[in-house]
Image: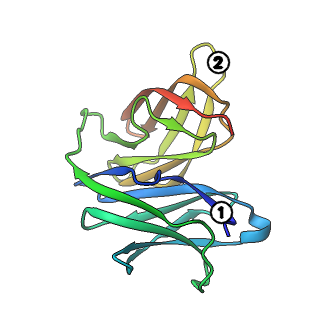
Amino acid sequence: MPDARIDYPQRDSTVKVPKNGQFFVAYGTADPKTVGNITGILRRAHHVVRLGKTLAEPPNWIIAFDVKKDGDFTLEIMGSALEDNLLADPRSFTVQFVEAKDPGRGVLFTFPASSATVPPNFAAYGTADPGFPVSGVMWQDMQAPFNGQQVQPPPNWVVQFTNVAAGNGYHVRVMNANAGTANCDSVVVQAP
């Protein structure tokens, strides 16, 4: 161990979860040749409280979790057989429920927030009106855009971005097919 890396949530961080959506995603990287399929487990005081739903397998894995209570959790990434094969160092973090701020466009960002720092491979997520697929794009001024791929449709949408060039000042936009949009700005992409 570790055969996988958890990029989000950060260790000892607070993950803000909208009360209306009550979900978040964890993401990271792993070598698919050595790890295979994975799943995630949320624990509270050493008790399993939630199994995750794997949305994308390695190398750039994404696991979604429904959460019903806020508080302190530990995330474990396991092989899909759920045998005692921890693939990454467990990650402690806090879930905090927050009021969702709907800008009136039908699409809300949960992550990333404006001015967030992300790795080159990450998952943007939030909530939107059900029934309308979402798409994502991110760009720096005067640079070619990076397109994201929807890996989970609304109402709790997830868009995966991969191989984004390192840099500052990225704009991230998620749109739905009903002309709804949400933006976050000044996102920083770290070098790998």
Q: Residues within 10 Å of mark 1 (few under 14, many from 20)?
A: many
Vertical relation: 111 (above or below) 90:
above
Question: At 51% from the left edge and 41% from the top edge, which residue is drawn?
Answer: 135
In the image, what residue occupies the spot 42% across and 67% down? 74
Viewer-side label of 1, 2: 1
The answer for how far apart the CA atoms under marks 1 and 2 are is 32 Å
Q: Earlier in the sequence, mark 1 or mark 2?
A: 1
| Kind of residue indicated by mark 1 | Ala
Instruction: Quarter of the image for the C terminus: give it.
Output: top right
Q: Is residue 61 among the parts visible in the rendering?
A: yes
- Residue 162, image x, y percentages: 65, 43
Is residue 154 visible in this depiction of the protein? no
Above-or-below relation of 185 to 161: above
Q: Quadrant of residue 167?
A: top right
* Residue 79: quadrant of the picture: bottom right
Direction left: furthest residue: 99
Q: The N terminus lies in which quarter of the figure?
A: bottom right
Going by the numbered disc 2, the residue's amino acid type is: Gln
